[in-house]
Each structure stands twice: as structure tokens, then as C-alpha cells.
Amino acid sequence: MPIHASEQILELDDVSLTIQVTDVVKLDQVQGMDEAAKARLLWLPSEYGVLPQEQQIAKQLALHGMESWFVDIYEAMFLSPTPSAVDEIPSDLIAKLIAFAKLDGKPLWVVAPNKAAQLAVRGLVDDQPTAQNYTGLILINPNLYLNTPKPGEEAQYWSQVSAVNLPISILQAEQSPWRWRVTQLADELQIGGSDVFVQIQPQARDRFYFRPDALEVERDITSHLADKIRQIMYQQLYYMDEKRQAGVLGSKVKNQIESTRSTELQVFNGEQNRALHLENIKGGKVSLSDYQGKVVLLNFWASWCPPCVHEMPSMARLKDQLAGQPFEILAVNLAESKQAIQAFTKAHPVNFPILLDQTGSAVQSWQVFAYPSTYLIDKTGQIRYALFGGTEWDQASHIEKVKALLSE
């Protein structure tokens, strides 16, 4: 049965928004359809823009009487969809869009993947506390950090996170550093009264439903994603209390956005004396304390992380350049199987130990929020420098810092 789409124009202040509406199939055309299933989903675009994969999911939902709205906010504001562009979208624009989507009284679900989660909580809380009424929130791999934390530092969430008061469901990929922070995020969301439900998507990576290199397990999860969203909507209906109201914004977090990305090692000012006890790929026990007297480059990585893969050859070259000196690289892998890592190292040989963090214990204790993240540790075991993001490890500035620690 073909699914059609229509458009409507919404003028908000100086911004003209084109809303693409995935029209629902008439319910009497669908055998066994429950009239009460009629509802609306507002898909907020993430830093990856409006995705055809999301529109395909919307078409599947339309077969069950669920209407979807898509709005290319970036195009309307003459922006390219990027992480920094998300921060530039005004809260009141999202708030007015949500208010418009609720005018006819249909139950509304806001679907927000990745950094679009930020748009959702800002739009739902700022200047319209009653937007919580008859509204549900579905977060997919949400990134609600104000800034990506520097390695070893605590995360700060947008202040609206602790004020939103809704039924909220989180679909979180298992193969992601955020997976190990999802309980903390749920606790933060519950401060304002939200009922929070978390579903971990086993073996899936970030962006699992629109990755060009999707694994079979990810394709399978994606094929059932519309049904999963529909089940979430039915579950949340029970919690859609008309008396919900957003909390008062706290002053503990100032929404001050900073650029924390760099390709240079930064002086580390966080907590010291972090332990590390893991197995290597051969099953041997490894502790960071075993390397006292050596300078250690401790790298957190995963084979599904393109910057991680890209920087590994330069790490191998760095170790070759420092051959014969008290220097080692330890590469901690996030929860991948030994078979997957062995296949990876066969295709991408390395000359340093790979450690297995199967339970995410090291990711949590070392405050890793993004991949790759790297620490440079001196001979006494003190963390001297840190960097999140990929780099070329044999560049002169890195070698200079390592050699300075070697000479101490």
C-alpha cells in the first residue's frame, strides 16, 4: 500500500519551516486497526540532518495510523547539519514547532536521535512548561552533553535535562561509550519527574540504523525499529498525565558551549591514580602498575570508530620511532569480541598490546565519553596529558612531549 507525503509551511518569526508530513493510511483500510492508535511523531533532525532511513521508518508507522513530521531546520536557517549547527538552533524555535504540532490535541511523540536530543529538551522546557502534557519523548543514542568532556573530566548536561517532565524512552546502542553513561543520564532525566525507560540495542553501534557499513545484526534491529517505536508509544500512553509540568531550571549548570576538540595533547588536570586491570588479547592479566618506570600512551578505541582506525598506523610508527626506550602503548578496546579484534588486527597489524574492556569498567573509571580518547602517563604513573579525538601520533608536537617525559 503506497504511503504519500504532503507539505505545509509554518512561518515562525523570521524563519519559514517546511513540514513534510508522512500521511497516515486511513485506518479502515488496515485490517484490525485500533482507532486509538492515531498519533503524531515529530522527528527532530540531528547533526546528520533529515535522514531517508528515518523517513522509511515513518512510512512503516504510517501503516498503523501514525503521522510523522519532518522539518529541515538547518536548511531553513541556512545552516549545514553539523554538531556545532545544532547548538545554533534557538530553543524558542523548537518550542513553537512543538506547540504547533500539539494544536489539534493529538498525542505527540518527539523523536530525537543523537544531538537532536538537546533540541528536544530545550524546546520542551524553555518558555512552555505545559508542553509536557500529552507528550512523549523517544531518544535514540542521545547526546545531551553540553560539551564533550575532556578525558578524565565529569560530563555536564544541558540544564533542561533535569527539568523535563515526560515519559521518556532511550534506545541506546550497546557498542558505544555512551552506553556506560546511560544510567547516569536516566537519573538526571528523572530529577524533573520524568518516567525513564532504557532499552539497550545489543551488538549495535552508534548510528546503527543509518550506517553505510551496517552489520547484519544492525540491519535486523533497524528492520524492527518501527515496531519497537510503536511499542514504546503504547507504553508511554499510560504515563501521559495531562497535569505534567516542566521543572524550574536549575543554576548548577550554565549552558556555556565550548569547543573541546583538538588534535594536540592537553595538560591533564583531572583525578590521578586511576587503576587499570584488564586482560590482553591472549588472555594474560595486565595492570597499569606493571609499567611503572615507563611512559605509557593509554588509548581507548573500537574497530567501528573511524578516527580510531585512522590513527592506529601513526601509533605504530610512534612506537617504532621510540624503540629501545622505556615507552609503551596500551590500546583498550571497548567490549568487542576477541574474534572481532583478531580479525581487525589481522587486517591492521599493530606492534603494541591490545587490552579487552568487556564490561566497560575501564571506560567508566577513566571517564571516557568519546572515542578515541587517549592519556599520556609518566614513569611514576601520573597522567600528564590527555586528548579525545583522532590525531597523527608521530607528529612532532606529540613526540616532543613523550621525549620530555622520557627524560624525566
Image (cartoon, helix red, strand yellow):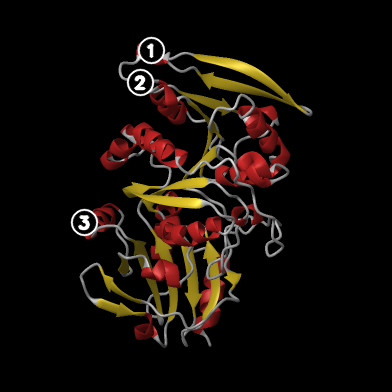
Sequence-first disc among 2 and 1: 1
Q: Residues within 10 Å of mark 2 (few under 14, many from 20)?
A: some
Q: Which amino acid, by three-letter code, is at mark 1?
A: Asp
Closest to the observer: 330 or 216? 216
Sequence-first disc among 3 and 2: 2
Label 1 vs label 3, nearer the camera: 1
Residue identified by numbered label 1: 28
Say if mark 2 contacts mark 1, CB within 8 Å. yes
User: Does residue 306 show up?
Assistant: yes
Closest to the observer: 282 or 243? 243
Where on the picture, by quarter, is residue 336? bottom left
Q: Residues within 10 Å of mark 1 (few under 14, many from 20)?
A: few
* Residue 33, x across and y down, in percent: 35, 20
Residue identified by numbered label 2: 33
SS at circle 1: helix
Residue at left offset 41%, top offset 82%:
326
SS at circle 3: helix
Say if mark 3 contacts mark 2, CB within 8 Å. no
Residue at left offset 51%, top offset 75%:
402
Residue identified by numbered label 3: 339
Q: How far apart, in angstroms, are the residues tagged by discs 3 and 2?
A: 45 Å
Where on the picture, by quarter, is residue 76? top right
Q: How far apart, in angstroms, are the residues tagged by discs 1 and 3?
A: 51 Å
Q: Which amino acid, by three-letter code, is at mark 3?
A: Gln
* Residue 306, x across and y down, in percent: 42, 49
Residue at left offset 41%, top offset 26%:
61
Q: Is residue 396 above or below residue 273?
A: above
Task: Give the residue furthest to the right.
Answer: 14
Q: Residues within 10 Å of mark 3 (few under 14, many from 20)?
A: few
